[in-house]
C-alpha cells in the first residue's frame, strides 16, 4: 500500500471538509478539482471523472452529517426548508447519480463546470435576505424551493457534489434566507441529497473503497471543526469565502475544458 497516496487523499479530504463545514457546503466544489488534478501532478495515478464523482458522493455524505451535528444546537436549521428541499433533492440526486453511468467523463466535467459557473454568478447578485430577522420566523416560497431542489439534485447527482455549492446561492439570492440559516440548513439538505447520489453511484458501479474510506475519515474529523469556526465569523465573510472558492474553481475547470 502506498502510504504517500493515502496521506495525500487524507490531506485533500481534511482541507476540503474543513472549508465545507465553515461555509455550509459538502466540499465537492473544492475536492472535485483537487482529486482530479493534484494526484497526477504529484506523480500518482489519475482518477477518472466517474471515480472522482463517486468518491465525492460518499465523502459528502459523512462530511455534511458531521457538520450538521455541529450546527444542530444553534437553532439555525430551518426544518420546513430542510423537509421541502430535502424531499425533492434526494430523488433528483439518485436519478443523476445512477444515470451518470451512461455519461462520458467529459460530460461530467462540463456539468460540474456549468454548476460552478452558475453558482459563481449567483453569489454576486444582490441579496435581500434579512440577516437580523428572527430565525424561527423565516419565510420562503415553498413551490419554488421544491422545484429548484429537484433540478439541483439531478445535475449535482451527476458529479457527486450533492449540490450545496448551488443550493446556498439559491437560498440567499432567490429564497432570501438569512446567511447563517442558509448555511446550517444546506448542510442538512446536502446530507439528504448525498443519500440519493451515493446510492446512485454505488448502483452505477463506480465506487472505490479505500479512497472513499480515507476521505470519510478526514471529513469526519474536519467538518465539525469548520462548523465551529463558522459560528465565530461574520456572515458577509462567509459569503466571500464561498464566492472566492467557487470563482477560483470555475476558472480552472473552464480553462481546462476550453484548452482541450
Image (tube, grey):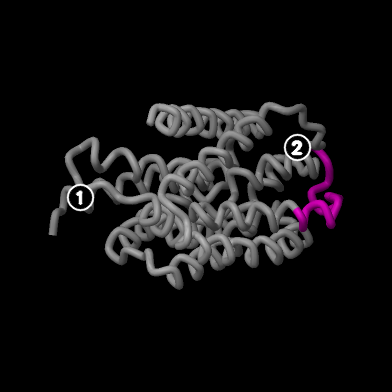
Left or right of 125: which side holds 160? left
Mark 1 crowdedness (10 Å alpha carbons): few <14, some 14-19, many ≥20 = some
Dot label at residue 160: none
Mark 1 or mark 2, which has the lower sequence index?
Answer: 1
Secondary structure under tag 1 reads: helix
Please provide percent x and percent y for residue 233: 59, 34
The reply to whether residue 147 is visible in this rendering is yes
Secondary structure under tag 2 reads: helix
Please provide percent x and percent y for residue 215: 35, 56
Task: Please give the name of the residue rendered at 78% of the width and 41% of the height, measured from the top-left corner.
Answer: 174
**Is 225 placed above or below 196 here?**
above
Query: Which residue is labeled 2 in the image?
Result: 173
| Quadrant where the C terminus is found in the figure | top left
Rounded to the nearest whole Å, what is the CA distance between mark 1 and mark 2?
40 Å
**Is 118 placed above or below 152 here?**
above
Image quadrant in which you'd find residue 121: top right
Front residue of this view, candidates 59 and 163: 163
Query: Which residue is labeled 1 in the image?
Result: 5
Task: Please give the name of the residue rendered at 51% of the width and 66% of the height, measured from the top-left corner.
Answer: 98
Please provide percent x and percent y for residue 58: 44, 62
Please provide percent x and percent y for residue 255: 43, 27
Task: Please give the name of the residue rendered at 56% of the width and 60% of the height, measured from the top-left corner.
Answer: 96
Amino acid at each position: 500500500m502506498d502510504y504517500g497516496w493515502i496521506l495525500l487523499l487524507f490531506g485533500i479530504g481534511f482541507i476540503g471538509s474543513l472549508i465545507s463545514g465553515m461555509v455550509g457546503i459538502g466540499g465537492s466544489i473544492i475536492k472535485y478539482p483537487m482529486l482530479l488534478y493534484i494526484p497526477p501532478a504529484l506523480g500518482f495515478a489519475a482518477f477518472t471523472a466517474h471515480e472522482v464523482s463517486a468518491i465525492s458522493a460518499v465523502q459528502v455524505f459523512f462530511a455534511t452529517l458531521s457538520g450538521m451535528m455541529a450546527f444542530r444546537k444553534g437553532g439555525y436549521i430551518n426544518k420546513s426548508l430542510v423537509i421541502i428541499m430535502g424531499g425533492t433533492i434526494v430523488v433528483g440526486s439518485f436519478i443523476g447519480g445512477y444515470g451518470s453511468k451512461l455519461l462520458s467523463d467529459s460530460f461530467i466535467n462540463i456539468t460540474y463546470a456549468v454548476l460552478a459557473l452558475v453558482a459563481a454568478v449567483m453569489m454576486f447578485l444582490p441579496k435581500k435576505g434579512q440577516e437580523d430577522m428572527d430565525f424561527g420566523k423565516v419565510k420562503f416560497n415553498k413551490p419554488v424551493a421544491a422545484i429548484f431542489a429537484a433540478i439541483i439534485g439531478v445535475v449535482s447527482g451527476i458529479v457527486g457534489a450533492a449540490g450545496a455549492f448551488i443550493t446556498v446561492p439559491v437560498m440567499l439570492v432567490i429564497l432570501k434566507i438569512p446567511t447563517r440559516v442558509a448555511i446550517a440548513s444546506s448542510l442538512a439538505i446536502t446530507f439528504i441529497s448525498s443519500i440519493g447520489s451515493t446510492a446512485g453511484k454505488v448502483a452505477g458501479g463506480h465506487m472505490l473503497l479505500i479512497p472513499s474510506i480515507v476521505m470519510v475519515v478526514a471529513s469526519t474529523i474536519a467538518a465539525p471543526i469548520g462548523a465551529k469556526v463558522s459560528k465565530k465569523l461574520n456572515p458577509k465573510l462567509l459569503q466571500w469565502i464561498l464566492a472566492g472558492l467557487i470563482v477560483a474553481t470555475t476558472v480552472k475547470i473552464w480553462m481546462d475544458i476550453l484548452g482541450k
